[in-house]
Image (cartoon, grey):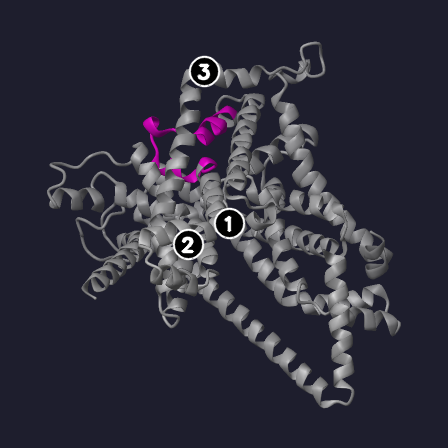
Amino acid sequence: MTADRVRSSLVTAYMVLFFSYLFLPLIIMTAATFNTSRFPTVAPWMGFTLDWFTVLWNDGAMWTALWTSFLIGVGVIVLAVPIGLSAALLLYRLHSKARTVLYAVMVSPLLTPGVIIGISTLVFWDRWLDVKGGIFLTVIAQSSFIAAYAMLLFMARLQRFDLTLEEAALDLGASHLQVFRRITLPYLMPAILSAAFIAFLQSFENYNTTIFVRGLDTTLTVYIASKVRTGLTPAVNALSVIMIGLTILGAFIYEIARRRDAARQESVKRRAVQADMALPGADYRQQCCRQRLASRSVSNS
Amino acid sequence: MNEVLRRYGPGLTAAIVALCAFWVVMLIVLPQLLMVDFSLRPSLPPAKLGGPEDVYTIKNYITLWNNTIHRSIFFQTIWASALVTAITFAVCYPVAYFMAQVARPKSLPLLILLLVIPFWINELLRTFAWYIILAFNGPLNLALVWLGILDQPIRLLGSPAGVIVGMVYVYILFMVFPLYNAIESLDRNQIEAARDLGSGWLRIHRRIVIPHAKPGIAVGCIMTFMLAAGSYAVPALLGGPSSRWFTEIIYNWFFEGGNWNQGAAYAFILLILCVGFILLMMRIFKVGLTDVAK
């Protein structure tokens, strides 16, 4: 009894320690933003100030970097989300050995260090295609791995896709483009939105890949890193605090949207099953459904 | 392929295949292949490209072996990344176990949210937080002196220990979640049964929890090691001359030495190292690629 109690209080202490370790650095960094000291620190405390936000606001280089990061983020959405979508749709329909190989190649950028993606993109596009480093090349380099994230998001959603909807539409004479626009695309819309969100965030945060392909352009992460090494003031903390605030806000919205969508999916499915059961011939249809599912899982494996 | 065509029609199929081909060929395969090709050629001025001197050579790879400084930084990077991986695992395992098996289901969403929040925050900003903590007049030195552990502040920034501490912090969440997911799927009854049959807690972990969590351990270790070995932000911010990282050498070949061929060779060596580590982990823990890339 006492041994158990000692152990459980030790475990609790460890968890408290662990979460302090996670959050204390962020709290210290935030606190240093409001210290008058010229160097970002919390001790000695020289008085509360909001001046560092003003300093940041008046820094023209920061605005340029922010604009560059924004352009790159939009570029990555435009390139990586359609690529990820096509790749998921293609893999969804392939059942051969080619699928395994293709899948391995497509997720390989996720298992490649970011610096290597930057280097290989730079070498290939600069030396063979004569495209110099800059915003365009950064979009290319970042998209090569962000498209893989997008693809995985689409594949997860397609797993729950009801194929019979497409079949029915095709049987009733819809064209392929109509089916895609009216059925597949609306079904995938939540995944498209989250893929765009994740793509922008990943792009905005990226540093390791960007430093090789940025050319003479400066993104916000590059700006922060250079400020830390030369001319560090708490203005960098002010920027960090804003970014952290926006990130947490974005994460909350993303989580809420995801949960709401999951709940809606669930209720739609439940209502459909209830309606189906209320109609005559339910047993027969259920059997057909089961058979079709069984045959599909056989052909998948 | 026929099924793709039947399902999406010729127009859509063409668009899908074109986008996929662009991605796979132009963004993944050709850059990697030509980086290797490039690393096997000497660095020449443009006028001599295609000339008699433009032949395949492994000279760029031999440089790493002959340059004792680069060689020692290379091995130091491997060793430090392995250390980061081991520390991260040791710190995370109890947390993951607690959350997956011990914590009350009611408090779980809050715990997960607390873990997710730092995960969303930029790697560079999390590194920067440690820059402030490790500073010569920073809170950590102050606390250590106040506690009487140190007589006077020491240089923490720029030391290898500083880089390792920062990396553990930055990459820890890539270990927690795979571990948690793996341990969570373990049936609690198995642990109860082992306990009823007289197993001590050490034995329960060694014989039941860890074997069950193998795929999660493999994924966590792969992610952490790969991120650590390929990290540029952490050593650039927290490191100094005594704690140089292999990625910094690669960067210097490109943007200070101006020898891209040499840099490409070093980058390929780093890639081989990471692929080797992935294969090693997959072999040790007997997991497949689909388990890893999730």
Q: Amino acid at mark 3?
A: Asn
On whether residue B247 falls in the magenta region, the answer is yes
Where residue B49 appears, x then y in whole percent? 68, 16
Quadrant of the image for the N terminus of chain A?
Answer: bottom left
Instruction: Say which residue appears at 65% left-offset and 34% top-offset.
Output: B31
Q: Decide whether residue B1 is among the magenta residues.
A: no
Of A58 and B233, the residue lying toward us: B233
Asked which secondary structure carries label 3, the reply is loop
Q: Which residue is mark 2?
A: B209
Amino acid on which the number 2 mark rests in the picture: Val
User: Bounds of the magenta span?
Assistant: B229-253
Residue A133 is left or right of residue B251, and the answer is: right
Give SS at disc 1.
helix
Mark 3 vs mark 2, CA separation in Å: 45 Å
Three-letter amino acid code at the position of disc 1: Pro
Query: Where does residue B102 sit, x and y in percent of width and height?
Result: 35, 64
The residue singled out by tag 3 in the image is: B67
Mark 1 burial class by Cα count in 10 Å: few <14, some 14-19, many 20+: many
Q: Earlier in the sequence, mark 3 or mark 1?
A: 3
Between discs 3 and 2, the one toward the N terminus: 3
Q: Nearer the viewer, mark 3 or mark 2?
A: 2
Instruction: Specify the label residue B215 is tagged with.
Output: 1
Closest to the observer, A282 or B74: A282
Q: Is residue A215 visible?
A: no
